[in-house]
Amino acid sequence: MYLRTIKGVDYHLFDNEEEFRKQYPKEKINTNWRTAEEGEWTVSDDGQILSIIKKSTINSTAYKGKQTVVKTLLGLKYTNGKQKLEGDPPKDINRFGSGRHKYITEKERYFAKLVAQGIDKKDAYIHSFDTNNEEYALERARILLRQKRIRTLVNKEIEEILDDLGISKTYLLEQAKDIVDKKDARDADKLRALETLMKIAGLLSTEKKTESLALIQEFKGFSRDKLKAFETGLLEESASQ
């Protein structure tokens, strides 16, 4: 839950309906924030529960005419069907745009830690957010893992685990090179295992997968400088050398 005081009034942003119901068990929720009126509780596009702080009509230069606008803890949004109400609370809620004041709750931090340890995302959510609804937990876990701040937190947790094991990116690359240089047929199985480790370490992320695999295929004869460039993410420069 996120709390913000505006002109002496407390406004709440709940992670989900289940959290909201613990404090407001009987309050009505308008499930369409675009039609919700000022003062009503509503649900964002990513499942958060919040209230409409203010609803008004303005002359919009962007849309060339009068448009209805709502102000919430997630900022100003047009209700014309094109914008989404989602994400993290911005520092200034009186502006349009995606400027964000990101925050991580303790429950989210624990969720990320469990995911990093290999726990199934649904079970990680159940243990972190105290729910027994498996279908709900799975959907909420998917929503969380689509958020950049949560994925970043998971990656940091994974890096800490790898550091504790003494596994660095340089170590993985050097081991992969040694395996590729060998002629034993079973090395292919070992290389697949190392490739899995590299995926966990983030070397084979979605954005860099093509370049990474190309470099792995050409490991033979790689210099230490190229390995170092690969480790620091200079894939295009290292590939062109």
Image: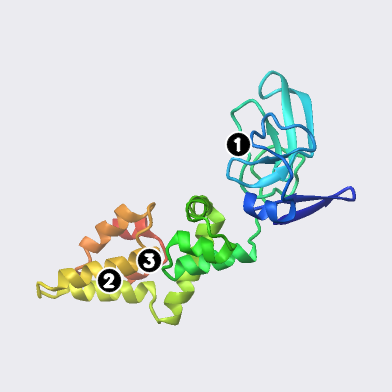
Residue that appears at 38% across and 57% down: 205
Q: Nearer the viewer, residue 7 or 96?
A: 7
Instruction: Classify the position of the C terminus by image quarter.
Output: bottom left
Cα separation between marks 3 and 1: 32 Å
Which kind of residue does numbered mark 2 sit on?
Ser
Label placed on residue 200: 3
For the N terminus, which image quadrant?
Answer: bottom right
**Residue at the image position 79 percent from the left and 34 percent from the top:** 38
Q: Which mark is residue 223?
A: 2
Find disc 1 in the rendering and name its residue.
Answer: 84
- At a point 68% along the width and 34% down the height, the residue shown is 77
- The front one of 214 and 62 is 62
Q: Amino acid at mark 1?
A: Lys
Locate residue 150, reporting x and y percent. Answer: 54, 58
Q: Residues within 10 Å of mark 2 (few under 14, many from 20)?
A: few
Image-based side of 24 in relation to 219, left or right: right
Nearer the viewer's eye, disc 1 or disc 2?
1
Work out whether residue 1 or residue 27 is closer to the camera in this orientation and state it. 27
Q: Amino acid at mark 3?
A: Ile
Q: Which one is earlier in the sequence, the residue at label 3 or at label 2?
A: 3
Q: Position of residue 106 (x, y in %)?
A: 63, 66
Q: Say whether residue 166 is visible.
A: yes
Question: Where residue 175 appears, x then y in whole percent?
Answer: 26, 76
Q: Are marks 3 and 2 in contact (CB under 8 Å)?
A: no
**Nearer-N-terminus badge (1/2):** 1
Q: Is residue 101 visible?
A: no
Q: Secondary structure at mark 2?
A: loop
The alpha-carbon separation of the residues under discs 1 and 2 comes to 49 Å
How far is disc 3 from disc 2 in space, using C-alphas? Answer: 24 Å
